[in-house]
Image (cartoon, grey):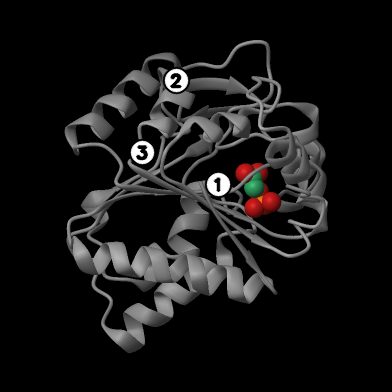
Amino acid sequence: MNIIVTESYEEMSKKTADIFEREVRNNPSLVLGLATGSTPIGTYRELVRRHKEEELDFSSVRSFNLDEYIGLEPENTSSYTYYMYEQLFNHINIDKKNVRIPDGMTEDPVRYGEKYDQLIREAGGIDILLLGIGTNGHIAFMEPDEELSVDSGVVELTKQTIKDNSRFFESKKHVPTQAISMGMGSILRAKKIVMIVSGKVKAPIIGEILNNGRVTTKIPATFLLLHNDVTWICDKEAYSRVTI
Ligand code: PGA
């Protein structure tokens, strides 16, 4: 496990972009796994800048997103599909045919996860996966529970996640209660994982994960401790409760 602690959100974003840039330049047909939320916005901004100013080429890159709300049309400004085009895909030269985001409007959400995992396998697996973390320790929409699904599929969102994510919606009651999410196995099969964490709101959960060194389904992100190529990039506020 590599841990990088940065002075600021901007530095976290640049260091993350450095890793992704290196991987894309080494392997133009890289398979990316991508995250949404507030945390990756700076990283995407930096990748867009490098595409525009430094010829970072995404034309053969393929990508899979972690999750999407069930019931939101791609045009809905709160959907993760909308977010990804706004923050990244509309501003780089990725071939839109190579972009995969779970379909929140699918008629058969239960079977959809199976299909999504199949598409990832057919692409040869995810080479590098960007992750954020929820204040409750979720990754993608793998929420704290007694058990965690290995495969991708439908998940129920916790009250905490609905509250945390309500800032992206008109109000809390507009937040969908279900999503399609990559499963824990689908996440851990990524060859390389970069977890980015920013702000003091994340300090308690990062402290708990890194100080305890234990795996529990009650904190899904603890499963990353079992992966052999994870880089945690935390700004100093997020890292402030780590004592190891
Ligand atoms: P955030 O979300 O980046 O908006 O904090 C992270 C997450 O919920 O995974």
Q: Are marks 1 and 2 in contact (CB under 8 Å)?
A: no
Question: Percent position (x, y) of residue 132?
Answer: 59, 48
Question: Percent position (x, y) of residue 98?
Answer: 23, 50
Question: Percent position (x, y) of residue 5?
Answer: 64, 64
Would residue 241 be found to the left or right of residue 216 on screen?
right
Would residue 177 be found to the left or right of residue 167 on screen?
left
Amino acid bearing label 3: Ala
Image quadrant in which you'd find residue 188: top left
Q: CA distance from mark 3 to mark 2?
A: 23 Å
Is 28 above or below relative to 77? below
Q: Which residue is mark 3?
A: 190
Q: Nearer the viewer, residue 55 or 218?
A: 218
Is 215 above or below relative to 232? above
Question: Percent position (x, y) of residue 197?
Answer: 65, 55
Is 28 above or below relative to 131? below
Nearer-N-terminus badge (1/2)? 1
> For the point 26% across and 37% down, which residue is it?
125
Amino acid bearing label 1: Ser
Q: Which residue is mark 2?
A: 109
Instruction: Give SS at disc 1.
Output: loop
> For the point 33% across and 71% down, which residue is it?
92
Amino acid bearing label 2: Pro
3 or 2: mark nearer the eye = 3
Q: Which residue is mark 1?
A: 79
Would residue 93 be found to the left or right of residue 165 on screen?
left
Whether residue 70 is visible = no
Nearer-N-terminus badge (3/2)? 2
